[in-house]
Image (cartoon, helix red, strand yellow):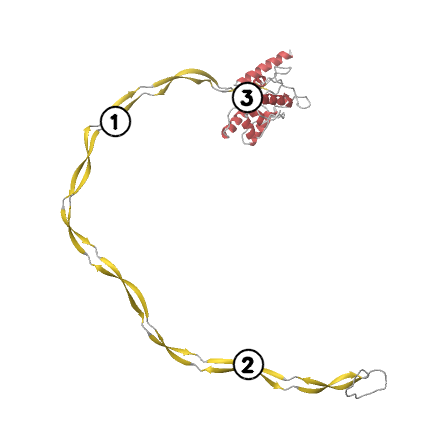
């Protein structure tokens, strides 16, 4: 009975999601033991194209106008431009250079003062002659003191006494400088010669004159042009050309729909590692770290584009396409009652950016509207939580 009630509740929730109430139900994924409990979110369906052969216009038809120019005959004719006549021709004069000396400064006399001449010599003269004088000095008795002993004692101890000593004083001399005039100052009259400068002067060697000559007639060759056929216009019609080409025609445009996704609180990091390994095996270069961040989200979106899958979140359609079996979170790591944390992180980041979104963990119409406004203002693809949007909001999926 309880199983049937859960089944009807799942059908009712799916009906609400398809009528525009987009939200995530925090229950177990459909891979588990309870397939009636599922999570849904918005995703974008891929565009569907079909190939059709169409007849396309390559070059449209047109009328081509040809302007045929006139035909002319061209030649040259000889005509006389000046008659024969007499003319006077002026012969220019000829010139020569004549050199001559020009007096610049005449000769003159000038008085020159010659100063007196002197000679100098030095002489040493004696100012005071040399002499000898007696001066008092002191000496000791008993020690070879022989001059003028005035006091003698019989004791053995030497005694100090005053004596007279003869001292020689040399003569004092002085150097005297003498100067005498050899010749007195005088004046002389000196003659300065005249100064000349050599200059060149142009003189007429032969004056100009007129010469009478006969000039012949002058002729010129002038071009001429004569029209033989007049210009005309011809109109030519060029038909249009067509070709058959195969073209991809959009059959169904992408749209925003509700799709089943892997519930965040019940998808383990081991599941993310398996998904990352599957993407790496298919040539997508990402780190295998168990974190479903913008890098892994971007690789998942590219995989979805390459395989014409719905884009957005970790859809169960993409998980099946990667042939991955999700691993359940351990109860100690993933609480069975916590809300969907990726939606909560998105709502918190949108609110911080100034876009109101109720932080209840439910991806409903209000959250979707705030997400689309944020994407429109930041030039992002509108519709789902893409890798670029996660990077712009600075969040990662809380798996």
Pick the front one: 384 or 46: 46
Q: Which mark is residue 331?
A: none
Q: Considering only order in the chain, which callout, 3 or 1, is on the residue closer to the N terminus?
A: 1
Dot 1: element: strand
Q: Where is residue 393 in the image (x, y as percent from the top left)?
A: 56, 30
Task: State the quadrant of the N terminus.
Answer: top right
Within-10-Å neighbours for mark 3: few <14, some 14–19, many 20+: many
| Location of mark 2 (residue) | 122
Alpha-carbon distance for marks 1 and 2? 126 Å
Which residue occupies 39% across, 79% down? 188
Dot 3: element: helix
Q: Which mark is residue 67?
A: 1
Q: Where is residue 312 in the image (x, y as percent from the top left)?
A: 55, 22
189 relative position to 368: left or right: left
Q: Considering only vertical position in the picture, is 247 above or below 209?
A: above
The number of numbered badges drawn on the structure is 3
């Amino acid at each position: 009975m309880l199983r049937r009630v859960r089944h009807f509740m799942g059908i009712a929730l799916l009906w609400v999601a398809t009528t525009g109430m987009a939200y995530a139900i925090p229950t177990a994924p459909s891979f588990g033991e309870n397939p009636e409990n599922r999570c849904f979110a918005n995703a974008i369906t891929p565009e569907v194209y079909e190939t059709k052969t169409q007849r396309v216009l390559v070059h449209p038809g047109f009328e081509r106008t040809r302007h045929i120019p006139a035909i002319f005959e061209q030649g040259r004719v000889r005509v006389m431009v000046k008659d024969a006549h007499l003319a006077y021709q002026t012969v220019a004069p000829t010139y020569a250079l004549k050199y001559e000396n020009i007096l610049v400064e005449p000769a003159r006399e000038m008085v020159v003062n010659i100063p007196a001449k002197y000679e100098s010599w030095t002489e040493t003269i004696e100012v005071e002659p040399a002499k000898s004088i007696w001066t008092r000095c002191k000496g000791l008795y008993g020690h070879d003191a022989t001059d003028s002993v005035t006091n003698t004692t019989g004791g053995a101890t030497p005694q100090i006494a005053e004596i007279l000593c003869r001292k020689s004083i040399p003569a004092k001399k002085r150097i005297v400088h003498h100067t005498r005039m050899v010749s007195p100052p005088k004046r002389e009259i000196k003659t300065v010669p005249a100064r000349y400068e050599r200059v060149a002067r142009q003189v007429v060697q032969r004056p100009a004159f007129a010469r009478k000559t006969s000039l012949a007639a002058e002729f010129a060759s002038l071009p001429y042009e004569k029209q033989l056929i007049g210009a005309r216009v011809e109109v030519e019609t060029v038909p249009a050309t067509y070709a058959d080409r195969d073209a991809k025609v959009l059959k169904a445009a992408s749209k925003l729909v509700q799709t089943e996704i892997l519930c965040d609180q019940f998808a383990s990091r081991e599941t993310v590692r398996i998904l990352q390994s599957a993407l790496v095996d298919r040539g997508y270069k990402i780190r295998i770290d168990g974190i479903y961040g913008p890098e892994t989200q971007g690789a998942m979106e590219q995989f979805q584009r390459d395989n014409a899958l719905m884009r957005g979140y970790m859809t169960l359609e993409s998980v099946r396409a990667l042939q991955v079996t999700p691993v359940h979170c351990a109860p100690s790591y993933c609480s069975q009652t916590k809300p969907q944390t990726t939606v909560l992180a998105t709502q918190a980041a949108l609110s911080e950016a100034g876009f109101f979104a109720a932080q209840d963990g439910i991806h409903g119409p209000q959250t979707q509207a705030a997400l689309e406004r944020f994407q429109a203002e930041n030039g992002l693809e509108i519709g789902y939580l893409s890798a670029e949007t996660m990077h712009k909001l600075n969040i990662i999926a809380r798996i």
